[in-house]
Image (cartoon, grey):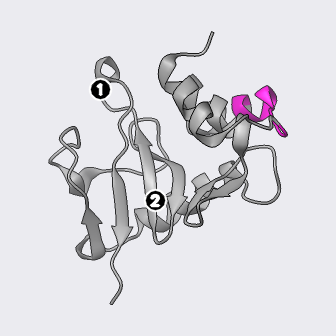
């Protein structure tokens, strides 16, 4: 049985299509990243991805060629690892470590690409396992 939060999400978006559900792709992605992703996240992506929601919000999927989540994760982590931090806007997140300059991308103890939104990325970070996953949103500022 799915939890209440997940069921509310499904109710809001309508019945999931389950077009690309693929446990093997998730296992390969998690092995590559060195971390198990939240089951609810995988369920949402399997149910709806790849898709653009309401225009700017994009959900990739690890089994597809278009909007491939594994490729998005690798390329986004590489791009953000080299980002000049003075160009990065960090939205307030009480659980984000104050040592922002030490944040890593695409590693088990770092931030992993979750979804894309316009010119920003919503990341998932496991951090302190006892507190669960957290979702900081980092945005590139336009010059």
Pick whichever, 14 or 127, lies toward us. Answer: 14
Q: Is residue 141 above or below residue 61?
A: below
Residue 132: x, y in percent?
36, 24
Q: Measure how far apart labels 1 and 2 are at the Cα level.
A: 21 Å
Instruction: Answer with the quarter of the image where residue 40 lies.
Output: top right
Residue position for label 1: 128
Image point 29% across, 26% down: which residue? 128
- Tag 1, which secondary structure? loop
Residue position for label 2: 121
Give yes or no for residue 107 being in the magenta stretch.
no
Q: Which residues are magenta?
A: 19-27
Residue 99: x, y in percent?
17, 49
Image point 71% across, 32% down: which residue? 26
Residue 37 visible from this viewpoint = no
Label count reads 2
Left or right: 77 with respect to 66?
Answer: left
**Residue depth check, mark 1 versus mark 2: number of the one nearer the observer:** 2
Pick whichever, 118 or 139, lies toward us. Answer: 118
Residue 20: x, y in percent?
83, 39
Image point 51% across, 50% down: which residue? 113
């Amino acid at each position: 049985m799915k939890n209440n939060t997940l069921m509310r999400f499904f109710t809001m978006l309508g019945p999931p299509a389950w077009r690309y559900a693929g446990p093997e792709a998730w296992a390969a992605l998690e092995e590559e990243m060195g971390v198990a992703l939240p089951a609810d996240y995988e369920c949402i992506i399997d149910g709806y991805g790849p898709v653009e929601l309401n225009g700017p919000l994009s959900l990739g999927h690890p089994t597809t060629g278009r909007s491939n989540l594994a490729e998005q994760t690798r390329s986004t982590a590489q791009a953000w690892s080299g980002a000049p931090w003075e160009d990065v806007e960090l939205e307030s997140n009480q659980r984000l470590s104050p040592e922002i300059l030490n944040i890593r991308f695409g590693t088990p103890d770092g931030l992993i690409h979750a979804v894309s939104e316009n010119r920003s990325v919503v990341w998932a970070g496991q951090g302190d396992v006892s507190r669960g996953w957290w979702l900081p949103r980092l945005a590139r500022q336009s010059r």
